[in-house]
Amino acid sequence: MPELNSYEIVADYLLRATQYRPVIGIICGSGLSGLSKSLKNPVTIQYHDIPGFPEATVPGHSGELVFGTMDGIEVVCMRGRFHYYEGNDMSKVVLPVRAMRLIGVKLLVVTNAAGALNKSYKVGDIVVIQDHFGTPLIAGNHPLRGINDDLLGPRFPSVSDAYDTRLQSIIVKCARDIGISDYIRENGTYCYVSGPAYESRAESKFLRSIGGDCVGMSTIPEVITAKHCGMKILGLSFMTNKVIIEQSDGPPASHQEVLEAVEKSGIHVENLVKAFITKNNLQSILAEVPKLEYKSKSKCPVKNHTVFGFAVTSYMLLALYAFAQNKA
Ligand code: HPA
C-alpha cells in the first residue's frame, strides 16, 4: 500500500468516525468556539483521538471537532486551531484544512482574534478580511512548501483572489440584518505574524505602513491551504486590542486583554456566522466548488473509548459469571 499523507490518514479516520459529510468548515478563533453549541445533533471528536492531530495548547482554545447541522446544512467546527508558535510545523498547522477538503468541505469560515493597527478600529469590531500580508510566508515559511499533491490543487495557486467578494457582501448584509452593522469593518487587510510575542512598535509601524489594518498569529496558513485546494473562503477578524505603535498609545498587549474582549462581545462573531449559514442560500456558491474525488485509502481503526469500555466491561462480567458458575 502506498504511504499515506497525514491529511489522508485524518480524513480516513473522520470518514469512519462519523456519518456527517460537512460542506462548511468553521475554524473558531481564541474564545470564539461557542458557535459549535448551535449545531444540531452534534458529534464531538477529541483532537487527541484523531491520528496525527496535535493538541491545542493555548488557553481559550479547546481541542475538539464538532460535527452537526445548521438549518439542515452539514457543518464541522474546529474548537481550537494549531499555531506555528506552539511548535507545529506548517504542515501540521494546515492539516485539518486539507482533511476537511478530503471529507467534502467546500467553504471555509475562519475567525480569529487580532490586534487593531487601523486607528479608526475599536475593540469589539469585526473585520471582514479582503486581503492579507503573510510576513513569515514571504520569508520562506510557507504552508505549500514541499511536494505538491495535484489531487488537492496546483503547484502555483493564486491567492490574490482568496477571499470571495460575494461572501464578504453577504456577511455585511447579515450584520445589518442582525443589527450589528456598527461593529463591521469592511475590506480589512490582516497581517500574519508567527508570534508568540506581540509585535514591537517598529514592527507594528511597518505593518500599518504597508496597508495592514489588523495583526494576528493565525489564519493565513489555513486560508492559503484552503485556496490551494479550491475552497471558498470567508475570513472574520475580531478586534481584541489596539496595537501599540507609539508608547503613548496605551498599555502593552496581553492575552488576558484578548480573552476579556472576546468574553465581552465575541458573541457577535458567533451570531454573525450563524446568520451567514442559516439565513442565506449559499447553495449556488457551494455548487461552484467541485467535489474532490477522494477514496478512503486506509483501514485506520476508530479509537472509540465507549466501544472499548463496553468490550472490557462485558468481558469482566462474563468472567465473573463463569467464576460464579464454577463455584455453584
Ligand atoms: N498581535 C498579534 N496577535 C494578536 C493581537 C496582537 O495585537 N491581538 C490578538 N492576537
Image (cartoon, grey):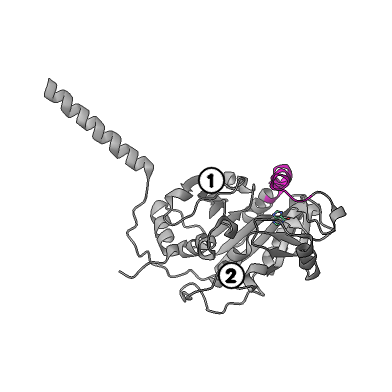
Q: In this rendering, would 151 be left or right of 231?
A: left
**Quadrant where the image shows the C terminus:** top left
Name the residue type under label 2: Asn
Residue at 64% over, 47% down: 31
On whether residue 319 falls in the magenta region, the answer is no
Quadrant hosting residue 231? bottom right
> CA–CA distance between discs 2 and 1?
38 Å
Label 1 residue SS: strand
Residue 297: % across, % down: 35, 65
Q: Which mark is residue 40?
A: 1
From the viewer's perspective, is residue 131 above or below residue 257?
below
Q: In this rendering, would 102 be left or right of 305?
A: right
Residue 212 visible to the viewer: no
**Mark 2 vs 1, N-terminal side:** 1
Residue at 50% over, 51% down: 55
Query: Where is ligand 1, by quadrant?
Result: bottom right
From the viewer's perspective, is residue 318 above or below residue 214?
above
Numbered range of the magenta stretch: 252-269
Q: Which mark is residue 141?
A: 2
